[in-house]
Image (cartoon, rainbow, N blue to C red):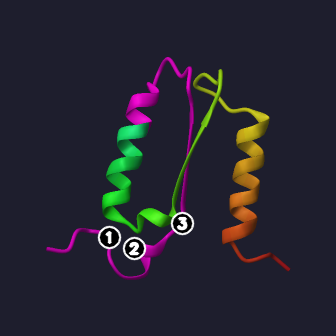
Amino acid sequence: SKGPISGVNKDIAVLQCHGDCDPLVPLMFGSLTVEKLKTMINPANVTFRTYSGMMHSSCIEEMMDIKEFIEKHLPPID
């Protein structure tokens, strides 16, 4: 049977980022979430990035990965 995600949304690109030292949301939960997501949409379009030493916050490397993801997947604004 079809799940709630169908049509064009099946091919949406997803970037999931997680710090490997997050005390609030353990890395294991991020890993479980990304594996579940891969069963719901095209797994080839799901990217999971982890950041060494990052807690429940962000870092320059993560922001650069997000910038690159946005530039790759969203049309430019005139």
| Location of residue 38 (image quadrant) | bottom left
The quarter of the rendered structure image containing the N terminus is bottom left
Q: Secondary structure under badge 3?
A: loop
User: Residue 2's spot in the image, x, y percent?
Assistant: 20, 74
The residue identified by callout 2 is 10
The residue identified by callout 1 is 5
Q: Earlier in the sequence, mark 1 or mark 3?
A: 1
* Residue in the picture at 46% in, 74% down: 11
- Which circle, 1 or 3, is nearer the viewer? 3
In the rendered view, tell whether residue 77 sits above or below residue 27: below
Specify whether residue 10 is painted magenta: yes
The magenta region covers 1-30
Name the residue furthest front: 44
The residue identified by callout 3 is 13
Q: Is residue 62 left or right of residue 9?
A: right
* Marks 1 and 2 in Cβ contact (< 8 Å): yes
For marks 2 and 3, give the CA distance.
Answer: 9 Å
Q: Earlier in the sequence, mark 1 or mark 2?
A: 1
User: Three-letter amino acid code at disc 3?
Assistant: Ala
| Location of residue 68 (image quadrant) | bottom right
User: Residue 60's spot in the image, x, y percent?
Assistant: 79, 36
* Residue in the picture at 51% in, 65% down: 45
Bin the neighbour count of mark 2 within 10 Å (Cα to Cα): few under 14, some 14-19, many 20 and up: some
Front residue of 48/77: it is 48
In the rendered view, tell whether residue 39 sits above or below residue 25: below
User: Three-letter amino acid code at disc 2?
Assistant: Lys
